[in-house]
Image (tube, rainbow, N blue to C red):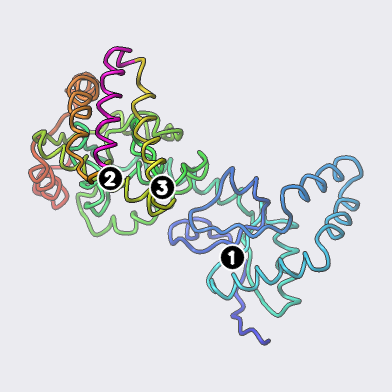
Amino acid sequence: MKYVVTIRPDTRDWRTLLAHAIPIIDVRAPVEFAQGALPAAINLPLMNDHERAAVGTCYKQQGQRAALELGHQLVAGDTRAARIDAWREACLRYPNGYLCCARGGLRSQITQQWLREAGVEYPRVEGGYKQLRQAAIEAIDNLSSLPMVLVGGFTGSGKTQLVNEQPLGVDLEGLAHHRGSSFGRTLSPQLSQASFENALAATLLRKQITWQHHHYAFWLLEDEGQMIGSNHLPHTLREQMNNAPIAVVEEPMSHRLARLRSEYFIDMQQAFCTAYGEEQGWQAYSEYLHHGLYAIRRRLGLERYTLLAERQRIAFEEQQRSGETDGHFAWLLPLLENYYDPMYRYQLEKKAAKICFRGDYHSVAAWLNDRRSGGITAR
């Protein structure tokens, strides 16, 4: 079979790779990829974890030449052919992509050579993942210093939707695959800390391209704590957020409950059943609800937790039986009124000097649009 390829040079343009989500064929071992990767990367390793460990041990004990010989022995014959086929298919699927290994050294060069022998010319990232990671860290440090506004408000106020509607909105919870509360998990597992930061850097760089179109530009982010699930916000971003003005969304409880019903009880139940099938999906959804409440049992106190857990159990059974979700308000409403709302109210009181606007969802959206267009002097 003849492959038509376009020869392109290797690259050191790490920021462009991040900003434009250019596909990366990452040939590091799966364990390395899991520790940190770019959003647009796919993992097609030259060596699997076991092979890499064996070669690493050999390198320490016998040196580079012996390690190379062992690597070629482990990745030979049908194994080598299968990996070349996988790389070749990926190269043809992503003709604008690049190869990448840890430091742009032997592994990506070997992959590049084997592909060339198979009739495919494909460039690699010079400096590898190490340089891409450094570019991501520098991008966060630099771009975090630009003006920003935070959106605050009680749970269910629509803050995430508001952020995503703005051209320079950065959905930190979306990037972290977590909604930032005890019920915050999603069906997508959270990324490693490095991968989360890489995704954040890519988003900032991509959105910075549109910065020039807005004379009074500013990042818009939710008023988050230091942690979003298991991911923590980078220090430079956190410091800038600590000094940013806050627009507070004040929505009536009825609107908040409607949003939370849709997001947590309807959408999550459907997502679990779609992912796992009807029976296992309902079970996973039940465990999700139970764990969300159980995680804060000590803060609630045993008596209150026991009462709310029983109401949650009854509501779940009613939803499973009839599809009705109103029963969930019997535990959700007191949880909001007695736990989440007082907690956020206390946190917001400490930031009172930074509050620059208050209003309902549509008022805050209009205020942000006016500020971005220059109708309100940037702070």
Q: Give the range drawn in magenta.
A: 299-320
- Residue 219, labelled with which disc? 2
Q: Is residue 6 above or below residue 209?
A: below
Give amino acid for label 1. Answer: Tyr
Q: Position of residue 159 (x, y in %)?
A: 22, 41
Q: Which residue is drawn at 21% across and 18% down?
A: 346
Outermost front residue: 321
Q: Is mark 1 on a helix, strand or loop?
A: strand
Nearer the viewer's eye, disc 2 or disc 3? 3
Q: In front here: 23 or 130?
A: 23
Which image quarter holds the N terminus? bottom right
Give amino acid for label 2. Answer: Trp
Taking the image as shown, residue 238 lies to the left or right of residue 128, namely left
- Residue 185, labelled with which disc? none
Q: Earlier in the sequence, mark 1 or mark 2?
A: 1
Nearer the viewer's eye, disc 1 or disc 3? 3
